[in-house]
Amino acid sequence: MLTITDLSLQRGGVWLLQAVSLTVQPGQRVAIVGANGAGKSSLFQLLLGQLTPEQGSVALPGGCRIAHMAQEVKASDRSARDFVLDGDLDLRRMEAELADAEARGDDHAQARIHGELDIHEAWSASRRAETLLRGLGFSDYDIGRPVSAFSGGWRIRLNLAQALMRPSDLLLLDEPTNHLDLDACLWLENWLRRYPGTLLFISHDRDFMDRGATHLVHFDQQKLELYTGNYTAFEGQRSERLAQQQAGFERQQARIAEIQRFIDRFKAKATKARQAQSRVKALERMERIAPAHIDSPFSFEFPLSEKVSNPLLSIRNGQAGHGTAPILTGINLTLLPGSRIGLLGPNGAGKSTLMDGLRGEKTLLAGDRTCGEHLAIGYFAQHQLESLDLDASPFLHLQRLSPKASEQSIRNFLGGFDFHGDEALSAIRSFSGGEKARVALAIIAWQRPNLLLLDEPTNHLDLEMRQALTMALQNFEGAIVVVSHDRHLLRNTVDEFWLVNDGRVQEYEGDLEDYERWLADRRKDDTEAPRNNQVTSNGVPAEASAGEGVGESADDRKARKRAEAALRQKLSPYRKRQTGLEKEMDGLQQTLQTLEADLANPALYDADGQARLKELLGKQAEAKSRMEDIEAEWLEVSETVESLEAELAG
């Protein structure tokens, strides 16, 4: 499938790869790991023809279709649905050809193109695009919104959906989970397991790799090492190579001892026997993998504040939301020193809203929030990175917090986050997302909090930094509340889970595996397997080829083809009308939602607002009437489409 031979590659005068060879077989799912800057993304650029190697070659089969996940997307007025559909280049090409044939009145060309569209299953394209969007966390309302209405992280999700929409033989994904929540990660894992092509993906999420990879390629010292198995298998194999290093072995034992002390505290909670057993398994795993991290550049902790209140924080009869509309009600919780909470819940259920409420932000609309006298909160969220002073260095950020601290103490502290020498004094404007995240975590740790509120702290962090963060959180003596899609971090740092769902916050008795099953039970319309439109040697789609009758004569086959073409031509205007009606219903639905929001304004019901109220009610009645007429026509057209499709299928 993919053959790399004697390849050497450099960027900016730095050698990334030297004389490497690699073969990836069809159908393999290959995770790509290595230090930041090792060349992982450059390898993808090479496969996409955007880079030229200094020597060697990259070979792919003729006609190999590549889909890749872009890292940026420009603002546009195209809807999320249309943006995702744009990923299917063949579909858009055939639609353009059909429009041209219709404009020319070429009936023969129209019939031929309709046949191609049917083979391509164009009739289900919109539904497949919407399934991808819902799986990645977009609401039904979001599907019709313009790309320009979404933030950067959600646009990355749109890029991912577009890549998944494109029929392909080779799929390249660069950090696909970076901007996903746990629910979307689990959905993506299931989708990729059904993907019929070859998958190469860059990731720092060990659980995602464990469940999605059949092989692993490690960038190490300008070489590519291919391992069979998932990330855990890779760590085990690599640890064997490193086990002879005595210094590393001693460090491994020290880490295991730290984890064991944590487990001893954890097992003392009789009500948490199930989580205790899970943590014991984590220790068994850590004993095997620790040597693979002996060369980690990170070593830090979260020092606890000198004074700690008990309880740290409590909320009684709370309501949380935005504006005047509560998302969560009946919030009753208490955080004690040593509380270690993981928040679970579907996208949009209110996890980040609850985190803001815990911080005392305006999202806490009602209720009593009581803080301990010595409460010191350390808060991390991705949007905080935007508030960093881009012209200041990591050193200056800490010095501003503690002007009397010695230069050496600040430098030593930053060294644990791998900011050494000139880098500690460099303006962070040019830093990567991962480096900025490390600065933000260093600022939190420097202030010695006793309550950590962490909202997706592992985004942009590489594997080694995630490992170091996990260790630091394990040894933190204060309280932790964390939202994360990194299941390894959750398993190894929290004692209990709270479920945020249906407007409530309550203790969740299960573990992450139970939560995944719970999600699967409530998830709908996401079981359709991905397509890659594979064809046989004669150019006929494999599915169509397999379905043709055995022993069918040439004349019978021609007659059947003519009849099918006639049916498709008859079906085409009904499908077109069906699509038009659906778009009109979507538009009316958005109009009705806007009108309902306008009608919720209390000022309309004063004497001065009566005229405007009457106008809005009239528009609402008109829109509802139009919606009823369109729905009735849509039902009639849909019945005709279903009847013709059944006839065509028969």
Image (cartoon, helix red, strand yellow):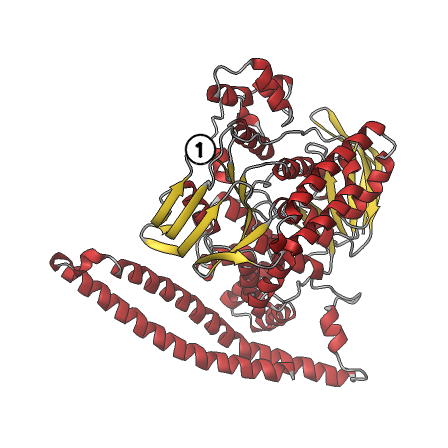
Compared with residue 121, is residue 157 higher up or lower down, i.e. above or below? above
Q: Residue at x 46, y 53 (%)?
A: 78
> Is 603 on the left-hand or right-hand side of 504?
left
Residue 44, quarter of the rendered image:
top right
252 or 361, which lies in front? 252
Which quarter of the rendering shows the C terminus?
Answer: bottom right
Residue 641, percent across and down? Answer: 52, 79
Instruction: From the image, tell me which residue sits under label 1.
Output: 374
Compared with residue 128, is residue 258 higher up or lower down, i.e. above or below? above
Residue 5 visible to the viewer: no
Residue 514, percent across and down? Answer: 62, 61
Residue 325 visible to the viewer: yes
Residue 424, percent across and down? Answer: 59, 20
> Circle 1: is it few (<14), some (14-19), or many (20+) Cα within 10 Å?
some
Q: Residue at x 66, y 65 (%)?
A: 529
Residue 400, percent across and down? Answer: 47, 20
Compared with residue 452, is residue 110 higher up or lower down, i.e. above or below? below
> Is 614 on the left-hand or right-hand side of 311?
left
How many marks overall? Answer: 1
547 or 98, which lies in front? 547
Q: Residue at x 37, y 65 (%)?
A: 589
Compared with residue 514, is residue 443 higher up or lower down, i.e. above or below? above
Q: Secondary structure at mark 1?
A: loop
201 or 552, which lies in front? 201
Q: Amino acid at mark 1?
A: His
Residue 406, quarter of the rendered image:
top right
